[in-house]
Amino acid sequence: MKKLFVLMLFLSGMLGSAQKNIYEHKNFDYLSQNHKVLAILPFLTNLELKHDIDKEELERLKEREGYAVQSALETYFSNRKKKKKFSVEFQNTKNTNAILAQNNITYENIDIYTTKQLSEILQVDGLISGSIDLNILLSKGIPTEFSFVDYFLGDSNYGRIGIKISDGDSGKLLWKYEKKIDKKTGKNTYDLIDKMMKLATRKFPYDREKKKDKIKKSKA
């Protein structure tokens, strides 16, 4: 019983931490009322590795990490979508990247385009994008050495990730979720995204369960 109580405290603490790091626009429901399809963009990456590498290799690694997050998010949303958990569709990332390439938009220059421009080019209602700061190559997996002290105190800090949703018509930021990356967040990119999104599941704005909660509260 004591172990169960400690576990419940730990999980509630993690959930509380997730909720504190979430922002949602006060007019989200109005701005997103016509949203049907969202595109997931490759994430912008900042790498500060401990070992020195040349600039060209660094840029290649940044791109690889950015596309790894895009792919992991698509996998997470696809798995949840099979259970009819979301009120929107997500554009296939292969199509997203192909359309971007056809319009000469690359990983290197995507940040010069506005949300509205990218949404129009991709023909979607909104964008899921973000940034990730790393001091390791998360796509390769985090160090395997395990320490209970590091695990509970979170001393092994590998960076931070921020996921945001923007409205295609207005370009406004609708939702944002930030989280630090350490040994508790997962062993690789896919594990990280799966765990952090599950923690925020009731706060994800297109989650059907969240909408049910809103309706219940409005009727209370």
Image: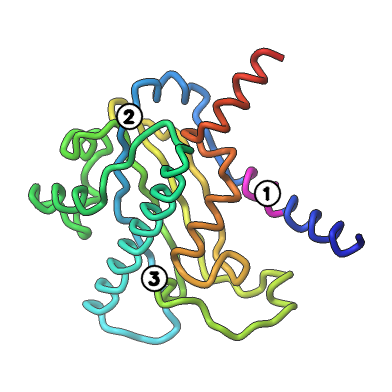
Q: Residue at x 39, y 51 (%)?
A: 130
Q: Secondary structure at mark 3?
A: strand
Q: Secondary structure at mark 1?
A: helix
Give amino acid for label 1.
Leu
Apparent side of residue 36 relative to residue 146 in the rendered image (left or right): left
Tell me the quadrant of the picture where the C terminus can be found. top right
x%, y% of residue 19? 63, 43
Question: Which residues fall within the magenta stretch?
Answer: 14-20
Q: Residue at x 69, y 73 (%)?
A: 151
Res 11 quadrant in image = bottom right
Residue pointed to by mark 3: 47
The answer to which of marks 1 and 3 sits earlier in the sequence is 1
Apparent side of residue 208 relative to residue 152 in the rendered image (left or right): left
Give amino acid for label 3.
Leu
Q: Is residue 162 found inside the magenta-colored segment of the image?
A: no
x%, y% of residue 7? 79, 60
In the image, is residue 122 above or below residue 151?
above
Apparent side of residue 170 relative to residue 20 in the rendered image (left or right): left
Residue pointed to by mark 2: 36
Instruction: Give 146 or 8, whichever is nearer the viewer.
Output: 8
Q: Residue at x 28, y 66 (%)?
A: 63
Residue pointed to by mark 1: 15
Task: For marks 1 and 3, give the CA distance.
Answer: 28 Å
Please tell me whether the stretch drawn in magenta is mainly helix, strand or loop.
helix
Residue extending furthest toward the right: 2
Is the C-beta separation of discs 1 and 2 under 8 Å?
Answer: no
Task: For marks 1 and 2, give the CA distance.
Answer: 28 Å
In the image, is residue 92 above or below residue 173?
below
x%, y% of residue 12? 75, 50
